[in-house]
Amino acid sequence: IGIDTLVLEGASASAVGTTVDVVSAANRILGTPTFDLRFVSPTTPVTLRGGLVATAQPLARARARDVVVTPGLGAADAQEISDRLAAADIGAAGRWLTQAHARGAEIAASCTAAFVLGAAGLLDERRCVTTWWLGAELASIAPTARVVIDEMVVRDGPIWTAGSAFAHID
């Protein structure tokens, strides 16, 4: 099963690292490399929050695989979200995610990465969650989405959202 981790500038380094750890643990428990993890990004290398750097396959050369996981953006308030959504890498990521969805990939986003899905229209008419203090902000960016803030993980068809940076582990 191919898993793409869509790594964006300033993303939570711990959420990216946890994704790697969970996939690695699953493969060890299963005793076979069932899950193939790769990083993809509009830019490479990618600087994560705290200055860690990740190398990724450029989106322009990456066709989405079975599952795409997008860790949180590392934004803490409405202004930071607005600034990130205006950035070129977010627009490229949104277009790539839309194509991935059209090809049948499962799409997952944790915490503030749900805003990338919302800006791309992937949350339209869907139930979704983000971190509790930004629920109203997500609803304003994705007005037809049904935003909830009292659940940890929400699945609506092939779209999964998680309420915090580590909730995508679930």
Image: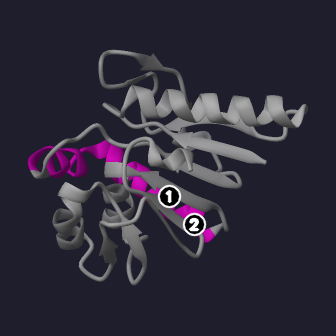
- Report the Cα–Cα distance between label 1 and label 2: 6 Å
Q: Is residue 158 above or below residue 107?
A: below
Give SS at disc 2. Answer: helix
Who's the residue at 22% across and 72% down the image? 139
Is 124 on the left or on the right of 41, as rendered?
Answer: left
Examine the residues drawn in magenta and state their main secondary structure: helix
Q: Is residue 94 magenta?
A: yes
Range shown magenta: 79-102
Who's the residue at 43% across and 27% down the image? 14
Give SS at disc 1. Answer: helix
Q: Which residue is mark 2?
A: 101
The answer to whether the residues at label 1 and label 2 have Cβ atoms under 8 Å apart is yes
- Residue neighbourhood size for the residue with mark 1, other residues' Cα within 10 Å, grouped as few (<14), some (14–19), many (≥20): many
Q: Which residue is mark 1?
A: 97
Image coordinates for residue 52, horizontal then vertical, percent: 39, 16
Image coordinates for residue 29, horizontal then vertical, percent: 82, 33
Image coordinates for residue 160, horizontal then vertical, percent: 52, 63
Image coordinates for residue 90, horizontal then vertical, percent: 33, 48
Who's the residue at 31% across and 64% down the image? 119
